[in-house]
Each structure stands twice: as C-alpha cells, then as structure tokens.
Amino acid sequence: MKKRWRIVGINFSHMHMEDLLRQVDEHSHADLVGVCDEQPEAMRSAIDNLKIAESAVFTDYKTCLETVKPDLVVLCPPTGEHAVWVERIAPYDFDLLVEKPFASSLADADRMIAAVQKTGKQLVINWPIRWEPCYYTTWQLITDGVIGDIIEVHHYGGNRGPLYHGADKIEFEPTADDKNRSWWYRKEAGGGSLRDYLGYGVTLGSWFNGGQLPIEVTSVATSSPGVEVDEHTITVARYENGLSKFETRWGTFTDPWVHQPQPKCGFIVRGTKGTISSYDYETTVRVQTNDCPEGYDQQVSQLPEGERNGIEYTLMRLDNNLPIEGPLSPAVSRIGQQIIETAILSIEKKKTVPLVDRGIN
C-alpha cells in the first residue's frame, strides 16, 4: 500500500464494532489510533481484547478526531442515529465506514449520502455476509453468465436474535429486561428484524440482479407479545420480469453460524438459464443449468487478497483511489433502502404499495 491508514472507531452500539476493529488490528498497513463512546463501559471488551492504550480512548468524538486525526472513521451507532452521526463526522473530511443496516429510512440514507458527497470522501456501508465465500462465489457465477439473466432472488435471513451473541459470536442468554433496555428492540432507534435482515436480502439481492428496481412491494410482519418491533417479516417484490421474496426472522431455531436452522439461511437465485442455491457459511453452492439440469455442487472460491473483509476492501479501494462497488456502495445500498422503506409502508397500510422513489435530498 502507498500509506499507513489511521483508523478510529466511534460509537459501540453495534456489536460488530469489535469485529471491525480486530480487522484493523490485523491489517499490515492500518493503525487503530482511537476509540470513542460516551459510555466507557461499551468499549471495555474491545479495549481489553485488542490491548488498546488508554491514551487512545475517548468519550467525546470531537476531542477524539481533533487529537488523533484519522484517515478513516468506523461508525457503529444504532440504526436510527446513522444519519446524525454521519452528519457530525463528515465535516471533518474523513472517509467513513458505517456498519449495516444503511439507515432507518430512505430520507436518512439520503442525508448520509449528501453529507459525504460535499466532502469528496467515500461512504462505505459494510454488509458482513459480503465477505462469505459462498456469496462471493454466487456473484462470480452470475457475473460469468452461468445462469443467464437474473429473474428471481429469494432470501431467508436471521438468527435467534441480536442479543443472543456479541463480538466474535460469543453467545449470551438475554432476559426480557435486556430486550427492554436494548436499542435493537425500539422502533425509534431503528430496531427490528426487517431493517436488520431485509437489508441483507435486498442489498445483496440487488447486487446479484444487476441493480434492478421492483415495481411494487407487499410485506407483512409479526412479533412476540410485549415486543414493539417486528421479529418476523415476509416481503414480496414484484419486478418487471417476476417476483422475488425476502423473509427475515429473529427467533430462528438455531444460529446459522453454529447449526443451520430450517428453513436454511441464505439465497436462491434463478436466472434464465439456471439456478443457484447458496447458504450461509457453507463450502459449496448448488448450481443447475440447461446443460446440467440435475445440478452439481460448486466448491466456493476464496476471496482474493484485498477484499476478504470490510476493512481490507475499504482500504484497498481508498489506497488506489477506486470507487466503492457492489453492496458496500451507497448506490446499491440505496436501492435496498428503497425496498425497505416500501416494505415498512406496506406493513403500515396493510396493502401492496408502489416502490418509494424519492430523489437524493
């Protein structure tokens, strides 16, 4: 690389922050120069596990940025605060990586895009399953034309719930009080399985289908008694060439990184010349083609150096003055946000609604 990259992590509300900072720590040309959260205890695990010096720990983001002067800021606030935090950080003229979901609304997503566009820097939205070899392989096969033009994408995504695991997938057993205190289970904070996992499905789905926009969306949702956010949703998107379906579930029987639940978490993609089924963490994908209708197992491809995780990919693109592409790009993530916003509207109105299509503010 042409330079060493100075990186800070601000706001530890999302448990993926420690995972991202570990990627920084393991990168040969990156230095973790600061961490910041108004609640010091939120940083304690990362400080201890990554052996972060106390001189690099801050509770005020302005002091942090002005003291360490980073090149890249990693943000992990509650979904409902993504726009606020991007607008706070953007004027400092640093590149920004925001952990998924993109935002709690399309208007917030557009605020984020506009705030960073003014600076000429890059905005990156990290979707962790982008770095799973099975989905990289799916995209490769689609790009190579193995199954023709994409006409359907089906996704089932979820886990037992966001409080059942932390960084490094360490397991917990949350109580009802834990849910009551957590932003994940509050509407105003952008909680709920739909914003969490529909984002995965429709953002990677839009990557797979070449950025197609649906015409209309139908969505239904349900939750457990006493829980104000959705825990189970089904969304059907009607495209010009057919229907695609996306299901989200907090409350799967098992977590897919331990034991695949039934239904299995993953994607089924249908093209004009074949199909691909690709499931979380599996080492093969199943392919059908006109030449092989009985199907075959395709061994997954390992990700190339430079795009094996969100930090590595971001630094590779920035270091070479290249644009962010695919699901991490604001353009593709915005398509996903349009579908999410339309699904939320469909749930509220209890009917099929046309795709929300507002321009960037």
Image: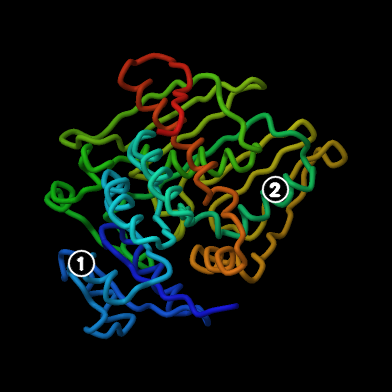
Residue at the location (52% across, 25% down)?
237
Q: Nearer the viewer, residue 322 or 356?
A: 322
Q: Is disc 2 in contact with disc 1, using a CB cutoff of under 8 Å?
A: no
Q: Left or right: 153 with respect to 349?
A: right
Q: Position of residue 288 (x, y in %)?
A: 76, 41
Looking at the rendered image, the quarter that the N terminus falls into is bottom right
Q: Residue at x 70, y 48 (%)?
A: 286
Q: Quadrant of residue 188?
A: top left
For mark 1, what is the residue? 42
- Quadrant where the C terminus is found in the figure: top left
> Residue 123 location, x and y as percent?
46, 53
Callout 1: SS: helix
* Whole-percent x, y for residue 334 in the image: 48, 38
Q: Which numbered disc covers residue 302?
A: none
> Which residue type carries mark 1?
Ala
Tell me the CA gap for discs 2 and 1: 41 Å
Identify whether 11 is placed above or below 44: above
Residue on which disc 2 sits: 286
Q: Residue at x 21, y 55 (%)?
A: 174
Q: How many marks?
A: 2
User: What residue sits 45% from the left and 72% below the top?
Assistant: 23
Give above or below for 191 relative to 355. below
